[in-house]
Amino acid sequence: MNFGILEKDFLLPEKMNHFNLNFIPAKNGVYFVGGCVRDVLMGNNPEDFDIAVDGDTVSVADEIAARAGTRVIALGKPGKTIYRIHSETTIIDVSPLKGKTVAADLEQRDFTVNAMAIDVCTQEIIDPAGGRDDIKKKIVRMTTAHVFRDDPLRLLRAFRIAAGLGFTLDTGTTEEIRRNASAITAVAGERIREEWIRLLGMPDSADALRHMNQTGLLTAIFPELTALKNCSQNEHHEFDVLEHTLAVYDRLETLLHRDSPRLSDHFSNIGLTGGGNPSGPSRITQTDAHAAALLKHAALLHDIGKPETRKIDAKGKVHFYGHETAGFFMVRAVCDRLRFSSSWKNYVSFLVRHHLRPLFLYIAQSKGRKKNLARTRFFLRTDPYSPDLILLFAADMMGKKKGTAESCDPPDMIEFARVVLSEYFDGFRPKRKFSPPISGRDLTACFGLRPSPLIAEILEKVELQYLAGYITDKTEALRFAENYIRSKNRS
């Protein structure tokens, strides 16, 4: 199917040519609708295609599947069934019109940029809500004032779509979101989760979160953030806890997506790295977008325990002792509310609980003291999420004061992250793929030790020395074990 004649103002990318859409029957009453139309008009490559049918939906779906050499999968409840066809190049969803005409169908859709159709037979563009003009203006605008009452999830979807397109919300839509923000609480947690993770997986979502905060939608979804506003901190912070949190989110997004030059060598390895310690936090294997999204979710919630733990000492200094632990339990409740999987919840709460743990490594490096054992011990206790913690910590430190990620205070934070990530990926991880130089059998054979907690203790110490580079072979490992046993006997 040739889309090139659709609109002179828009040129289609050459990469559209690899889609073979000749198996779409050019019949009356068959329409491309929604996001695929928007993408085509913007010159982008649609990820999938939605087709609305005025007539026999099943026969149209069957014909598409037959031409594509595949089959139809029926999804959804009776009366709301979608017929899905997986071709070699894309996914096509076929459904009946929602209304008596295609115009009536489009009027029920959420935003004008999604409320357009292409008549498959005539190739006419049907645009009753002015979506093409809004694409040119780069705005996301609601089709009608009741779209958010019809489905409050659209409150969040508006920001997700705007962030994905690089558009802004128009004034009227923003005000309607502000008036209806509290309605999001009626939406099922799993539906919010899906939109939320999609938003956070985008490389430029920090502005969207700030805008959500201004409309009240962010705290409607996460009421735990409300107490962060006007919660003042110590002399090391220029912001209250909420503004600090949003700054941390922005700094982390910069580190993850904007190719900070001194970290770029490690970007392919960063984020939910997986593998490593089977006794550590649950391993997660997800797409890169999910990895970044969950790390940014942890950044947004990393300090929610601060208001609960805020104390002022006799000298008037503000402290938040134990806020990581308080936040750990609060974050787990948030994840339950959004129906996160156990592995997602464990990952996010692990990062929140340990987000200050890299501090002692940073202090040592800033004072010129490179402590191999301390870093190796940190890796052992936080693997496989050591890099994630380092990035979160770096963003946390950079979000204390005004400035950008590259002009932050302290200015050496990116260098600190680069050095530690290099040691983790180039030193610790490769070594950990191999077994330590000695085993419990070696300790029994050489020193006559019987099975006891002492053997496990010695092996743990040997592994630490080996991974830190102080032991390189079996002979050195046995010598270390012998000295350790002697010291234990003396004590």
Image (spheres, helix red, strand yellow):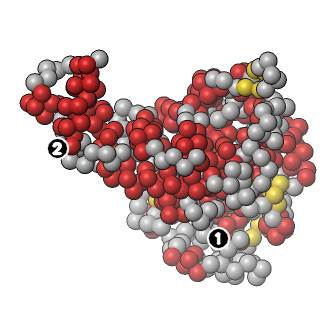
Name which quarter of the figure residue 475 lies in: top left
Residue 26 versus residue 185: which sits nearer the camera? 185
Residue 221 versus residue 262: which sits nearer the camera? 262
**Is residue 241 at all visible to an observer of this figure?**
yes
Instruction: Tell me: 258 left or right of 99.
Output: left
Instruction: Tell me: 141 left or right of 392.
Output: right
Residue 382 versus residue 50: which sits nearer the camera? 382
Residue kind at label 1, given as amino acid type:
Asn
> Which residue is under mark 1?
44
Q: Quadrant of the N terminus?
A: bottom right
Residue beneath the point at 33% across and 53% down:
430
Report x, y in % for residue 407: 73, 58
Residue beneath the point at 55% across and 69% down:
25
Q: Is residue 485 above or below residue 87?
A: above
> Which residue is under mark 2?
475
Q: Could you say which disc has been placed on residue 407 in the image?
A: none
Q: Residues within 10 Å of mark 2 (few under 14, many from 20)?
A: few
Q: Quadrant of the C terminus?
A: top left
Report x, y in % for residue 39: 67, 67
Residue beneath the point at 91% across and 50% down:
172
Secondary element type, mark 2: helix
**Is residue 269 at all visible to an observer of this figure?**
no
